């Protein structure tokens, strides 16, 4: 599954891989994590329609659990196999800013030593864009242990996206 959004979007956001709902719909970020992303973008003052969204890995890797398909982390081989398509998307869109959503996206673009927990919300120069910012993946909010944690993490996520909005003004 390839990304979607304006051909000349100023912001390109990269996730890890499609999820169950994305796989069924054939579109990125339309499931629960996509709904969180939409809320955070709106709170940060960024229109979803102005953003190109895609994933590092272009297929949904999963494990069966009863009748459910549960996300499985992609291997380095799968990431490497999909990087040419991601690079092509970056080259075609030519965004002013790239936002890596989660560790898989950040490490694919900024190197295996990148740590979102330590380096999120800061600007870096990447191979395909002069401004790259990494933040959490919206799906991590779905795994927060309680409502207070979800609110704090969502506020941090919005603050990271607000920094992107501010940089583009």
Image (cartoon, grey):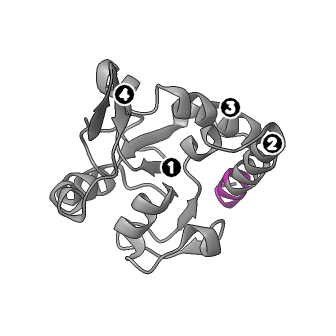
Mark 1, secondary structure of its residue: loop
Mark in the foreground, 1 or 4: 4
Mark in the foreground, 3 or 2: 2
Majority secondary structure of magenta residues: helix
Point out which mark residue 151 bears: 2
Residue at 53% from the left image edge and 73% from the top image edge: 115
Mark 3, secondary structure of its residue: helix
Q: Do residues under tags 2 and 1 come within 8 Å of each other at their CB atoms? A: no
Q: Residues within 10 Å of mark 2 (few under 14, many from 20)?
A: few
- Residue 146 image offset from top left, x and y in percent: 77, 40
Residue at 67% from the left image edge and 61% from the top image edge: 167
Q: CA distance from mark 2 to mark 1?
A: 28 Å
Mark 4, secondary structure of its residue: helix
Q: Residues within 10 Å of mark 1 (few under 14, many from 20)?
A: some
Please state, as top left, top right, bottom left or bottom right, where the N terminus lies in the image.
top left
Q: Which residue is mark 3?
A: 39
Point out which mark residue 167 bears: none
Mark in the foreground, 3 or 1: 3
Farthest residue to the bottom: give it.
Answer: 113
Q: Which residue is mark 4?
A: 20
Residue at 45% from the left image edge and 65% from the top image edge: 106
Q: Do residues under tags 3 and 2 come within 8 Å of each other at their CB atoms? A: no
Q: Quadrant of residue 107?
A: bottom left
- Region of the chain picked out in magenta, as a range: 161-168
Q: Is residue 101 above or below residue 70?
A: below
């Amino acid at each position: 599954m390839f990304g979607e959004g304006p051909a000349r979007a100023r912001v390109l956001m990269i996730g890890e891989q499609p999820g169950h709902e994305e796989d069924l719909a054939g579109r990125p970020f339309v499931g629960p994590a996509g709904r969180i992303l939409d809320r955070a973008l709106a709170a940060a003052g960024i229109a979803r329609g102005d953003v190109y969204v895609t994933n590092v890995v272009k297929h949904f890797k999963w494990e069966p659990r009863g009748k459910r398909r549960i996300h499985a982390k992609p291997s380095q081989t799968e990431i490497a196999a999909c990087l040419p398509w991601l690079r092509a998307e970056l080259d075609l869109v030519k965004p002013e800013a790239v936002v890596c959503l989660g560790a898989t996206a950040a490490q694919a673009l900024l190197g295996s030593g990148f740590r979102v927990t330590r380096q999120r919300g800061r600007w870096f120069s990447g191979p395909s864009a002069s401004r790259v910012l990494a933040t959490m993946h919206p799906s991590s909010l779905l795994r927060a242990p309680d409502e207070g944690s979800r609110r704090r993490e969502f506020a941090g996520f919005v603050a990271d996206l607000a920094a992107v909005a501010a940089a583009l003004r």
